[in-house]
Structure formats: structure tokens, C-alpha cells
Amino acid sequence: MLQSTPAPHWRTLSRQAALAVGGAALITLSAKLQIPFWPVPMTLHTLAVMAIAVAAGPRLALATLATYLAAGAAGLPVFSGTPERGIGIAYMMGPTGGYLAGYLISAGVTAWLAKGRGTLGRIGAMLCGLAVIYALGLAWLAQFVPGDRVMAVGLLPFLPADLVKVALVAAGATLPWGRLGGLSGGPSDGPSGGPFDGNSGR
């Protein structure tokens, strides 16, 4: 009796690579969009990172953020402050570098904590991921601004908008599009740019 031949492994890898590139393009677009908000304009950077983490699972979320950061390191203008404020590794070593690194780690942490959770669990996972972004972002930012100004410059103006983004992703994850994890191999797979990124928006 003949057995069905499993799909070639390269097809799975190709599909995951395509999803990672598409996700990186989505993050790039979100970084470039400016939306009026109080107390400063915001980008959708963090929203895209959290949405991908919740929808895609740990493995694909990490691959997507790694693709995004690799594109930026290669000199592509994927960040919200590029090319106006620099490009490539030089930009990534600037004041927002900690936030960019935080996105990568946050994507994995958020995706892992959110896996299989309900709405409240996903919100908790995203808040943990947000804490990772701010922890790394503020620690790195402290090298560029006085210590007593770090919170005022790198946290307080952007936290309200980031909490709104968490709520939006939590609501959106209940919709059919929030099941991207199934495309990445199933459940087993598994704040927006910083104070000087773009026009002071996150």
C-alpha cells in the first residue's frame, strides 16, 4: 500500500520565510505611519509587533522581527526615523537602539506567553512584552540623556498610546485574522521606535 508523501520541508520553510518577510514589511509600514495622539503623535510600530507576536507564535514572531532588524542593519529605510535621522547600524546604535532590540525579545516573550491564552492572558502577555521593550529601551537611552530625564523622555509620553495599542490588538485577536499561528505550523511554533524615532511618535 502506497503511503502519501509528506510535503517537502522546503515548502514549509518557504512559506514561513514569505510570512516573515511580509510581517517585516507590515512593521515597516506601521513605523512610517503617524497618527495624532496625546501627548505626542504615535506610530503603529508597537501595535504591529504585538499583533504579529500574538497571531504568529514564538518561532515566526522571532523570525519576522529578526528579518525586520536585519533589513534595517543592511541599510534599508525600515525604521520610522530613517533615512532622515540616519540609516543602518549607525542608526541602530543611536538613542532608539534599545527599543529596537526590545522589539525582538518582546516578540518572543509575548508570543510564548500568549500561546493558547484567552483575551486576558493575551493582554497580560502583551503587557509583559511592553515591559521588555521599555526596560531595554530606557536602559540604552540612559546613555544619551541625563538619568533624571530618562522616564520623562522615553516612557511617559508614549505609554498611553502603547496601552491603547495593546487593547486594540487584544480586541483584534478575537477576529479570524488573528489565527495566523495556524499558517506558521500551529500552536507549537512557537513602544514604537523610541523617543527620537521619527517625529517624536511611537
Image: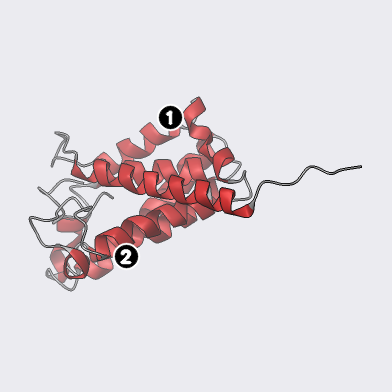
How far across and how far down the image is residue 150, in percent?
A: 18, 63
Q: Is residue 72 visible?
A: yes
Indicate which disc, 1 or 2, sits on the residue closer to the N terminus.
2
Q: Residue furthest front?
A: 2
From this view, report whether residue 86 is shown above or below residue 112. below
Q: Residue furthest right?
A: 1
Q: Residue furthest top?
A: 175
> Which amino acid type is shown beneath numbered disc 1?
Gly
How far across and how far down the image is residue 155, in percent?
A: 23, 54
* Disc 2: which residue: 136
Give the residue displayed 37% in from the left and 32% down from the top: 168
Query: Which SS class for mark 1?
Result: helix
Give the residue displayed 14% in from the left and 33% down from the top: 36
Question: Which numbered disc covers residue 172?
Answer: 1
Q: Nearer the viewer, residue 183 or 119?
A: 183
Tell me the crowding category of disc 2: few under 14, some 14 to 19, or many 20 or more residues within 10 angstroms, Cα based: many
Query: Which SS class for mark 2?
Result: helix
Q: Nearer the viewer, residue 37 or 198?
A: 198
Q: Quote the CA–CA distance across marks 1 and 2.
A: 27 Å
